[in-house]
Image (cartoon, grey):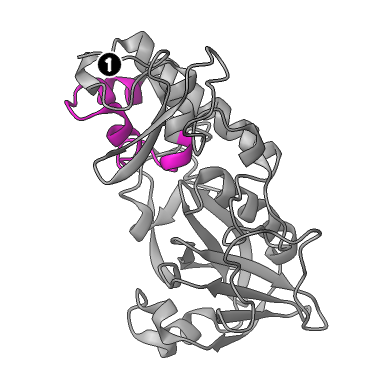
Amino acid sequence: MPELPEVEVVRRGLAPRTVGRTVTGIELLDARIIRRQHGGIDRLRAALQEVTLTAVVRRGKFLWWRLADADGADTGEALMGHLGMSGQLRIATGDGTAFTPAAPSQGPASDPLRHRRLSLHLDDGARVDLIDQRLFGGLWTSALVEAPDGALAAMGSPDALLPTDAAHVARDLLDPAADLPAIARALRTRRSGVKTLLLNQQLVSGIGNIYADEALWTARTRFDTPGSALSQRRALAILRAAREVMERALEVGGTSFDALYVNVDGRSGYFARSLNAYGREGQPCPRCDRLLRRVIYQGRSSHFCPRCQRRTM
């Protein structure tokens, strides 16, 4: 599943190609991709008729476009997107052909023809294709509300407004308005394992399995350490490690283990080459040479070093 760095790569790719463009049509190929849309395709078409995309915004793993009507006034709604497990937002050029990867990716690539579920047609002749092999993602509209803290809603936002359907999602660690000491204190009030807490999108958003394992390896903390056992200093160290590893992933386009995650041009990210723990079961720990282990913890794989990340209860 794309995590925060991968979704931010997509947002940055969409911004210069879609902001300022007017939606001229919607092509729906599979109604399941709009299952979250109240009123179905008719409501979606009405909400997007001749609207201009004024910003592309991201909080955690949620993306949305801000919308303006023909007079330039905000419509009061956002067009939300979530990539789910295998979703891609790809830009097709003005002649209707999709960009192709600079180099082929390995793995179960989504077929841009078979798995194209919806397309937004823009006034410059380009289109935005939502491609989703497993159909866990989607597009839908959501009314705007003000962020409770009054700060800019998220990355790329022009103001404090965010979609109602993203209002429950906590700020992420790349958000300048994120209060790391407050998040650390919240982690320390819970008895659940720290990895479970990092994956809780209501505490801190955008972190998934990959970056949780990498952050905990960096902070020398075992995945099942209770949040209540953390000092404030250790909790902050974990959050800062997560932020740092996601910033490094963002610099190289995110993490692609297969072609289910690519950017808007169809290119893969290369952070998989820099991972220290995730996916490296049986290989030497880069820090101490002890063989890394993988265990199933609450239904998820957790990769860790048994020497550097010892049990603390």
**Direction from residue 192 to residue 142 in the image, left or right:** right
Q: Quadrant of residue 226?
A: top left
**Direction from residue 189 to residue 37 in the image, left or right:** right
- The residue identified by callout 1 is 311
Q: Quadrant of residue 213?
A: top left
**Direction from residue 118 to residue 182 in the image, left or right:** left
Q: Nearer the viewer, residue 105 or 21?
A: 105
Residue 267 x/y as whole percent: 72, 57
47 over 201 or under it: above or below = below
Looking at the rendered structure, the kind of residue marked 1 is Arg
Q: Which residues are magenta?
A: 182-211
Residue at 55% from the left image edge and 67% from the top image edge: 67
Q: Quadrant of residue 22?
A: bottom right
Q: Which residue is most to the left?
A: 191
> Looking at the figure, which quarter contains the C terminus?
top left
Magenta residue check for 48: no
Residue at 61% from the left image edge and 76% from the top image edge: 111
Residue 180 x/y as whole percent: 41, 23
Q: Nearer the viewer, residue 128 or 54?
A: 128
103 over 112 or under it: above or below = above
For mark 1, give the secondary structure: loop
Q: Nearer the viewer, residue 71 or 246?
A: 246
Query: Can residue 267 be seen by looking at this rendering?
Result: yes
